[in-house]
Image (spheres, rainbow, N blue to C red):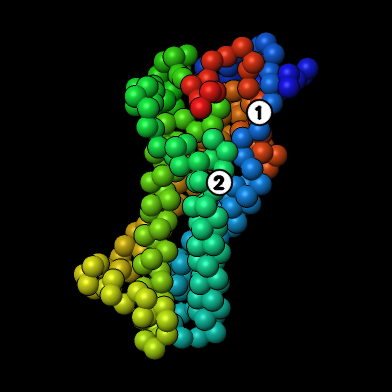
Amino acid sequence: MTATMKPDSGPESLLGARIPPPKGDYKWVYLWGLPIRAMHWIAAAAITLLVVSGLYIGWPFFHGSDPSGLIMTRFRQVHFLAAVALATAAVVRIYWLVAGNRFERIRALFPLRGRDFANLFRMIKFYMMIQPEKAPHYLGHNPLQQLNYTLTYVLALVEVITGFVMYGQAWPTGNIYALTNWMLPVFGGIQNVRLVHHSLTWWFLIFVLTHVYFAFRSDVVEGGGTVSSIVTGGRYFRANRHYEDEHG
C-alpha cells in the first residue's frame, strides 16, 4: 500500500551533518506479528525489573547489612518472578523462530548469505557516520542487528541458567536444585556462577541503552517509524528503494 503522506524526517541535522528530507513515495510494510511485539515488551519489562532488583540484591544499599530482612525478600521475589516472565517470553521467541513470518524466523537472526557478511561492515561504517550514503537497506534486521540480537539471546540464556542455579542452591530439596546442581562443576563453583551472572547484567544495561538509541536514531535519520513498528507491527519504507531482504 502506497502512503500519500511522507513520514516526518525529524530534525534537519544530526551531529552537525545535514539530514535531507525524505522524498518520493512510501509504502507501509507489516514486519512484526503480535506474539513478537508482546514478547518484546514483556522482555523489556522483565529485564528492567531483573536489573534493578539484581543490583539491589548484589548491593542492598537501601537495607544495610542484613540480607535476610523483608525488603531483601521482596526484591528476591520480584527478581525470580521477572526471571520466569523472561524465560516464558524466550519460549515464545523460540517457537516463533519457526512459526513466524520471514522477518521473524531463525534465518532473520543470522547473516547467512554471502552478501550479508560484506554488508555487515558497511553497516558498521553507517553507524559510525562513515560513508552513510553507501549503507545497504533492509526491511527487517540488518546483519549487524542480527548478530547483536543473536548474541543477546545467547547471553540471556546463560543469565537465566546461572540465575536458576543460584536459586536452586537455596532449596537443596527442590526440583530446581535437582535440575541445575550438576552445572556447578561446569562453571567451577558457585562463586563463578555469581560472577558470570552479575557480569552479564552489565551487558544488558549497555544493550538496552544502545538499542533505544539506535532505534530513535533510525527514526531521526530515515523517518520510517522504527520505534512505532514494535507497537503497530509495521513501518514506512521508500517504495523506489532496493532492500536486501525484500524477496526473502
Q: Residue 175 carries which label?
A: none
The quarter of the picture where residue 183 lies is bottom left
The total number of labels drawn is 2
Name which residue lies at 45% across and 46% down. Answer: 207
Instruction: Find residue 29 and name its label.
Output: 1
Type of amino acid at the residue the image marks with label 2? Ala
Observer-nearest of 42 and 195: 42
Is 37 above or below relative to 71?
Answer: above
Q: Nearer the viewer, mark 2 or mark 1?
A: 2
For the residues labelled 2 and 1, the Cα–Cα distance comes to 19 Å
Q: Which of marks 2 and 1 is nearer the N terminus?
A: 1
Q: Which amino acid does label 1 sit on?
A: Val
Answer few, some or many: residues within 10 Å of disc 1's Cα (few below 14, many 20 plus, some between 14 and 19). Answer: some
Can the viewer see residue 129 in this picture? Answer: no
Residue 171's spot in the image, x, y percent?
A: 41, 85
Give SS at disc 1.
strand
| Residue designated by label 2 | 99
Is residue 220 in view from this perspective? yes
Residue 93: percent from the left, percent from the top? 52, 51
Residue 203 horizontal/vertical position (percent): 39, 51
Q: Which residue lies furthest to the right in this view?
A: 4
Identify the residue at horizontal 37%, vertical 32% (top origin): 112
Q: Counting other residues with Cα less than 10 Å from the Cα at mark 2, is it few (<14), some (14-19), or many (20 or more)? A: few
